[in-house]
Amino acid sequence: MLAKFSYILVCVSTSLFVAFLLMQLFSERPRTHSSASPASHFQVRELVAGRKLTTLSLLCSVPFAALFFVLSLYSTTLATAGKQLLLKKLREMLDMSVEPFEKVLSQLPDLLDQLYVLAVTLLLFAPYVRAPFVLFRNLIFKAISFDDRIDDVAEAGARAALATLKYPSAKNALLSATGSRDAPVAKELINAPDVKRLAYQLLHFSEKDSAKHGLRRGLGMTLKKIGVEMPSVECPPSPRYQLVFAALTFYAILCGAYAFLAPHIAPWLQHSHLVKILLQPIEWPHFTEELAISAVQRTLSFVIPLAGGMFFYTERRLRYPSESSFQAFVVVFSVQFPFALLVNVVFAVVFFARSEAGRFAGDLSLLDLSLWTDAFLFSLTPAVALLSWILCGRIGMGRSGTIAVVCFAAAVAFCISQLLFEAMTSHITGFYWHQLVFGAFITVSYGMAALVANEVFPTIDGNSLGRRADRQIRTAAA
C-alpha cells in the first residue's frame, strides 16, 4: 500500500513539474518584430498581468500535464514493454540465448520504473522533442489574435493622445512625465504611422505597470501622466473560476458514473435476443478501468479540442469579419487537429506497451498501420463536431436542434472511426456500437458542464458563440 502511494506521489510530483516547465514555455513567447504590430516587439510577460499570465499558461499547460500523468501511471507497463523489446532485439542481433540478460533485467527493482518517469520528464524538453509544444503555443497565440488584441488597446490610447497632442508633443510629454531621456522606437516601426510609433512607446513606458496591474490599467496610468484619459475598449469579461471548478467537477462525476455503470450493461447485451437480432456483432466494455482510461483519452483528444475550437472560431470571426467561416474553421483546425493527434499517439504508445507487457491478448506492433490510423481518425472527430456546430449557428438552428445535431455528429464520427479501424484489422467485433453511445454521452456531458459554467465555456445551444459572432458581424456590416 505504501509503495503504491509513493509511486502515485512520484507521478503527481513529476506531472506538476511538467506543468511548471510548460507554463514557463507558454509564458516566454519570443518577440516576432512585425512592422505592422507594436505588440510583437514585446514578450508576453511585459504585456499581461502576472495573475492573467499564470491563468493563461496554466490553461494551456494542464492538458499536456494530464497527458504526461497518464504516461507516468503506466511507466511500469512501459518499462516492461521496453525490457521485452530490448530482449527481442538482442536475440535477433546476437543469435543466441538472452537468458543472462533476462535475469539481470528481472532483478532490477520496480522502484527504478519511477526513475523512468523522471527521465521522460527531462526528455520532453530536449530541443527537438519540445518543438511540438512550441508550435502549439504559437498556434494558440495566433488563433486568439494575441498581438492584434494588444495593438487595439495600445493604438486606442495612442489615438486618444494624438487627438489632443501632435506626435512630437506627445513624445516629449511622455519623456517629461517618465523622467526618461529617450523614447525608443523599434527599427521596424521607424517609418510607421504616428499612431503605431506612439502605441509602441506607450507599451514601452507602461511595461512595469502593465505587468503588475494589467495592460489597460497600465496604459491608463501612463496616459494620465500626460493628461489624457484612456478610452474604454470592449473586452471579454473575466471568467468566474468558481464556475470553472464546478463545471469540471460535474463533468468528472458524469464520466465517473458512466465508467462505473456502463460495464453492468454488458451481461444484458450478451443475453438479449433483441440485441442479437438487431445489433450483432456487438462488443461492450466489461471493466471500469478500461472505460476510465477511454474517458480520459477522449476528454483530452475530443472535449478539450472541441471546446477550444468553439472559442477560437468565435474569436477569429469577431476579430476578422472579412474572413469566411471556412477560413476561420481551417485556422482553428490547424490547432485542434495536431493537439488531438498528439494525445491519441501517446495513448497508442501506451496501448502498445500494455500489449507488449501481456495486459491483454494480441500481438501489436508500433509499425502496425491500423494503430496509427485509429489515432488519425479519432483526431478528426472534434473537427466534425465543431463543423456541425458552426453549420447549426449559420442556419440559426434552435437550442434543442443544435445539441441534437452536434451530439449526433460526434456519435457518428466515433462510430465510423472505430468501424474503419476494425475493418483495417479484418476483425469486426462490433465495438463501434459502444463508441456510438460513448461519443454522444461525452458530448452531452460537455454540454451540460458548459451550461454549469455559463459565460466561461462555449455552450452547445442555439445561442452559441458562433451564432452570436455571425450576428454581430452582420450588424456591424449593416
Image: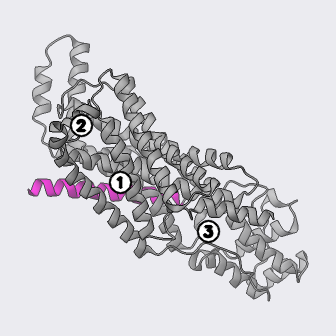
Q: How crowded is mark 3: few (under 14 residues within 10 Å), some or many (20 or more)?
A: many
Name the amino acid type tagged 1.
Answer: Ala
Q: Residue 473 placed where, x, y %?
A: 72, 62
Residue drawn at point x = 90 percent, y = 76 percent: 168
Depth check, mark 1 against mark 2: the one in front is 2
Pick the residue in front: 50 or 365: 365
Q: Quadrant of residue 13?
A: bottom left
Residue drawn at point x = 25 percent, y = 57 percent: 256
Q: Is residue 381 above or below residue 192?
A: above
Depth check, mark 2 against mark 3: the one in front is 2
Residue 16 magenta-highlighted: yes
Depth check, mark 1 against mark 3: the one in front is 1
Residue drawn at point x = 58 percent, y = 53 percent: 392
Bounds of the magenta span? 1-27
Precedes in sequence: disc 1 or disc 2: 1
Q: In which quarter of the image is residue 203?
A: bottom right
Q: Residue 285 placed where, x, y %?
A: 22, 41
Q: What kind of element bears circle 1?
A: helix
Q: Mark 2 points at which residue?
A: 275
Q: Can residue 132 be seen in this view?
A: no
Q: Residue furthest top?
A: 95
**The N terminus - image quarter:** bottom left
Q: Horizontal placement of 376 versus 92: left or right?
A: right
Q: Is the magenta stretch mostly helix, strand or loop?
A: helix
Q: Name the residue under label 1.
A: 66
